[in-house]
Amino acid sequence: MFYKEQFMKIAIISPGNLPIPSVLDGAIETLATHILEENEIHKKLEITVFSNYNAMAKSRSENYEYSNVIFIKTKKIYNIMFDLFFRFIRKIKGENGLPLNFFLFKCCSIIKKNHFDYVIVEGGIHQIITLKKRLNNRIILHVHADILHSTSNFAKQISDSCYKIIAVSNYIKDRIETICPSNTGKVIVLHNAVDLKRFKASLYRKERLELRKQFGIKDTEKLILFCGRIDKGKGIKELLLACEQIDQSVEYKLAIVGASWFFSKKQTEYEKEVETIAKLLQNRVLFLGYISNQNMPKYYAMADISVCPSICNDAAPLVPLEALASEIPVIATKRGGIPEYANLAACELVDCDEKIVNNIASAINLFLTDDSYYQNKKKHTREAIYKFGKEQYYNNFIDILK
């Protein structure tokens, strides 16, 4: 591995069980991987990543010249005993923050022995307090969800422990700034990104035809795509109810890609409820289960419309970006940070109110019955996504560090 002295040195601490590089998906892990990949091209940083161990990720990381990934094995018996011991000690002392587990202990030990200009914590807000007590480094927290605001536990202590806080949308920025409204310069927005070269429908024309044939989708049928967790907040139930109101003269199918949690096969009560509603639509609904992000470009390519019907305040979902990059117009709700990612030139935004089902149905009917309106939206998809490419993401990230 070759480094230059003038490179800015940063440490990135992964948020959970999924590894970096992203070989098992995960939005946060995918975004961090974008940084590593772009840094191999532009060579502006010396990066050390701390990740849970995964053999595939370790093999992939060996291709990096300007990044070093330190994999920590957390599932060995003595590591588990370490975690239990420190949880017990902190409970007795009544300390707040995340207990010092083996993963954080190893991170701190290595960081203390090396120089880093910044330590960047991806996702986990309660790691901050633990890390701040043990490190003298400037800590930057990258917040990916609506988990840090004035009513969050230890919010002020977490905020004060950070040198800077990166938010994935202006919506999240505003929520964080409720903690200390006068300290507006601490929170900076870094919008999420997508790999524009990979998510491109024209690359998958053959796969589009093969998949549509595989799933019994006729050439005359329009395919509506939902991609995401089958979770109440994602609005899949509302989407299914809206499909009952689609113009009867229109031939369509709805493909649902996702599970309650990544590759989990355990069915939740909400999933059972969703399936019950889907049966009312007879053979129009396809449950495709979890599809890896590596294969998702092919599934976007077979679709005609992507719907992001979130009823929760989604911080910054990647689905609208991936769909637009795949040249698919998007219908989405005006929730959380979604409007910041869903360009109106290529998207239809609907109100998330007591009429949400009717609102979604009206938007779908408009796309399916007014071809000139639909084609105009489709024409602007790629230009609407241009500023959300991973190269721009990397450059924006560098600007924040500078």
Image (cartoon, helix red, strand yellow):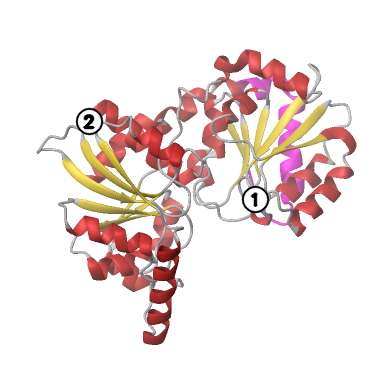
Q: Quadrant of the N terminus?
A: top left
- Name the kind of residue labelled 2 in the image: Lys
Residue ID for mark 1: 234
Residue 153: x percent and y percent? 43, 74
- Name the kind of residue labelled 1 in the image: Lys
> Is residue 346 depicted above or below 31 in this figure?
above
Residue 54: x percent and y percent? 45, 44
Question: Which portion, as a residue range, is magenta?
Answer: 350-376
Q: Is residue 352 magenta?
A: yes
Pick the residue in front: 35 or 369.
35
For the question of whether residue 186 can be seen, the reply is no
Tell me: 318 left or right of 12. Answer: right
Q: CA distance from mark 1 to mark 2?
A: 38 Å
Looking at the magenta stretch, what is its main secondary structure? helix
Residue 388: x percent and y percent? 42, 33
Residue ID for mark 2: 43
Which label's residue is closer to the chain start, 1 or 2?
A: 2
> Is residue 298 depicted above or below 254 in this figure?
above
Tell me: 51 left or right of 43. Answer: right
- Indicate the quadrant where residue 214 lies: top right
> Is residue 295 depicted above or below 137 in this figure?
above
